[in-house]
């Protein structure tokens, strides 16, 4: 995760930096590049020294989304009427 006051400019600079390593050379909207995290970090440090680069952020919002979905499912299941085991 990278925080920068100039995020759009930094993103464009990174795209130029790694343009030869773009995975999809036909559709430029597909923003995937064959580069290592270390290469990205080095480029960010060179292109935007004031940007903050975090390697320890592990999809926090995704994990929160999964937890919310699980809670909604649990709530739904607990609100369903339960049939008795025996009649």
Image (spheres, rainbow, N blue to C red):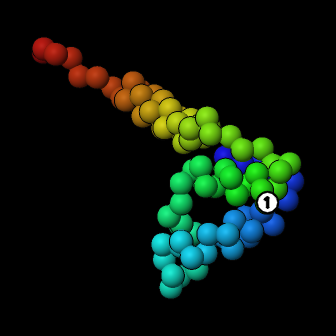
Disc 1, SS: helix
Which residue: 62% across, 69% down? Answer: 18
Which residue: 39% across, 24% down? Answer: 78
Percent x, y for residue 74? Answer: 42, 28
Percent x, y for residue 56? Answer: 61, 35
Residue furthest to the bottom: 26
27 to 65, vertically: above or below: below
26 to 65, vertically: above or below: below
Instruction: Report the quarter where the C terminus lies.
Output: top left
Front position in the image: 39 or 83: 39
Residue furthest to the left: 87
- Residue that badge 1 annotates: 47
54 to 40, vertically: above or below: above
Front position in the image: 77 or 58: 58
The mark tally for this picture is 1
Where, by quadrant of the figure, is residue 20 drawn? bottom right
Whether residue 85 is visible, yes or no, is: yes
Percent x, y for residue 17? Answer: 67, 69
Percent x, y for residue 46? Answer: 77, 56
* Residue 43 horizontal side relative to residue 34, left or right: right
Where, by quadrant of the figure, is residue 58 drawn? top right
Which residue: 67% across, 50% down? Answer: 41
The crowd level at tag 1 (other Cα within 10 Å; few <14, some 14-19, many 20+) is some
Front position in the image: 4 or 68: 4
Whether residue 72 is visible, yes or no, is: no
* Residue 60 horizontal side relative to residue 45, left or right: left
Which residue: 61% across, 75% down? Answer: 19
């Amino acid at each position: 995760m990278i925080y920068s006051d100039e995020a759009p400019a930094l993103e464009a600079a990174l795209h130029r930096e790694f343009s030869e390593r773009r995975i999809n050379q036909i559709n430029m909207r597909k923003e995937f590049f064959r580069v290592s995290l270390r290469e990205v970090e080095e480029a960010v440090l060179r292109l935007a020294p004031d940007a903050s680069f975090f390697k320890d952020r592990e999809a926090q919002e995704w994990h929160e989304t999964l937890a919310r979905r699980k809670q909604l499912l649990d709530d739904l299941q607990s609100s369903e009427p339960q049939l008795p085991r025996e009649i």
